[in-house]
Image (tube, rainbow, N blue to C red):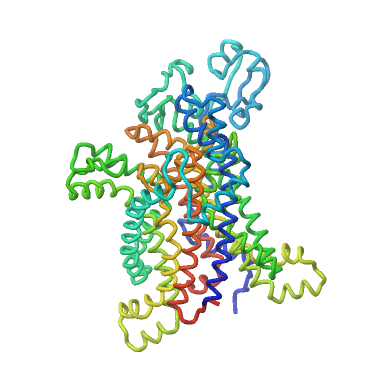
Amino acid sequence: MTTETRTTGFWGDAWRRYRRRPLAVAAAAFVGGLVLVAILSPAIAGTKPVLCRYKGRIYAPCLAYFARDLEPAIFARDRFRGTYPRNLVEKDPESWAVWPLVFQDPYRSVRADEWPGLPANPARDEGRPSRRNLFGTDQAGVDVFAKMVHGTTIALLVGFVSMGIAGTIGVAVGAVGGYFGGWIDMLTSRITEIVMCIPTLVLILAVIAVIEKPTIWHTMAIIGATGWTGIARLTRGEFLRLKESEFVLAARAAGAGPARIMLRHILPNALAPVLVPITFGIASAVLLESSLSFLGFGPPPPTASWGSILNDARSNLAMWWLVVFPGIAIFLTVLAYNLIGEALQESTDPRLREARK
Amino acid sequence: MATYLARRAIFGVLTLVVITCFVYGLARNMPGTPLTVQLGETDPSRRFNPEDLERMKRIYGLDRPWPVGYAQWLANVVRGDLGRSISRKQPVATLIAERIGPTFLVSGTALVVAWLAAIPLGLYASARSGRPDERLSSLVLYVLYSFPTFVAALFLQIIFAVWLRGTAWELPLFGMSDVPPDAPSLVRIGDVARHMILPVTCQTYVSLAYDSRFVRANLEEAVRQDYIRTARAKGAGPWRVLFRHAFRNTLIPLVTLLGLSLPGLLGGSVIIEQIFTWPGMGRLFFESIRERDYPTIMGLTLMFSVLTLAGQLLADILYCAVDPRVSVE
């Protein structure tokens, strides 16, 4: 009775348990690292300066890698045509620039002497990994390291956007079905079962074929629109269980409407078990996107996705570096999300918690 | 039991109608038709002239709107006719019959190998739970579980077909057989077996990792039950407790999982069959989407959906069969 007992909330408690698992912490750090790489991608690899002073003003041409319109118009007017190093010096001897760590472009091959003294990228099957091209180059001479750094954004977005969609649909469908019961539950359960029965890849391939110009956003939307069934079933189960509990009765007695009870009272209590399938869903969304790109159903060519690099490798397997680097990146990402999901499950599930005391 | 089955059957048929209607609508709305996609892409001079195209469209019933086409397809299916493939000029049923054997060969072998290895692995993992050797093997299995199949397939292809080319370990990259069909049957079997090694390995390792984790999770759940404590108290040895008392009670979820793996058994894996150009169902589906071959797409969708529904039903019925406490009602 000497120490005062400090009570921690449910999430604080879960975080304490999560931290005890070194692999899960490493996995979370890995995903954090991917986010950093994605945000900093133009500063890691690119051919446009991160910051430069040109004709008296400071610009950040590297933002063009996020959206083409962000490239300052002055460089198009002065006919830079994407080649900065030479043009900057020639057109304004006073200029200075901060360059990305690696001078390589994810969308095109670097030409000879584009950077003073730097030779052209090797093309066809000669682009083994070297000091200049860390992960080698593909058939067209494009640097694989730059492609992968810029593909990180896609790998992250695919997981979060598609599971954001799937989570919203799944929680909504499951919550409505579980809370109201009766014929509504019957209807939502049937719909869930029907969507479950359609083979996912079949549906996705068919929908992508229907869209005239599929972009990566379409792929994410489709993965999200088909991947919600597991989440819906779990949410339904949680709502069925929780709607009988006393705090719901108390809320109802206090005059709360169904929407308020579902969102403010039941959902926060059902969130932990629902987060687990969402995390595993992120892993499978990443996997699905890369296998679609691998099958040639990915985003159109200039967009760099890890799976599409693998697709390039199929025509010449002797170029092992086109398989090993993106393959390991996809693998590590999927592994990280799976580890996070499992740790979440074990640190938030009270049954498992008691068993592992 | 009969009413239960009847209810499930009615819902099943309704589900099938919704799914096939949806997929038919999707397929008919893909850009291009089987008549234009296939010929136009290979050689512009071989495109049909407009009158011929209209005539062909009429013959295949593509000039009418898709709901009419769907009704026609449904009516034929009810009479037991899956239609004829437009791009392959063969009945869809024949195509499926041709492709189902190779798919079953790979996925059946993979399933048997995976379960034969997964059960001992799961038993071992829960018997030595928490010890360093178990931790290591569980970690390896976990890593395998997260390893994407297509990446593994490419790695295996590079190792066995590129790096080991010319050695005794070289394995074929593509297809199912290289020897002529009139070769002695032993040679042919050996050749197919050599072609099978890589696709079977790819399909086995993921399910092995998943299944053994599943076996282990269920065993750990069973080990916490009261009857295990009773068995231990009566003096049963650790292995006897594990086998006779705990494992037998984990058979229930295993049986369910087995039922749910039915569609994969005959449906095949699109990606693996595509990588290894294995002439199976998954590849047929992929090709039929690219060729806009509506009858084949529909025949395969119907088959996949029937298998999924049958697998779920089978799992539920088996569940009742092995667990007398559960009744289908």
Towards the viewer: A242 or A36: A242
Image quadrant holding the C terminus of chain B, namely bottom right
Query: Where is residue A191, by image quadrant?
Result: bottom right
Vertical arrangement, residue A179 with respect to residue A160, above or below? below
At which x and y percent is residue B284? 42, 45
Q: Is residue B212 visible?
A: yes
Point 48% across, 26% down: residue: A104
Query: Where is residue B121, by image quadrant?
Result: bottom left
At which x and y percent is residue A299? 54, 36
At which x and y percent is residue B273? 38, 46
How many marks on residues?
0
At which x and y percent is residue A34? 52, 43
Q: Is residue B132 visible?
A: no
Residue B244 falls left or right of residue A8: left
Towards the viewer: A294 or B84: B84
Query: Where is residue B138, by image quadrant?
Result: bottom left
Q: Residue furthest right?
A: A255
Vertical arrangement, residue A344 with respect to residue B127, above or below? above
Vertical arrangement, residue B288 with respect to residue A66, above or below? below
Towards the viewer: A177 or A336: A177
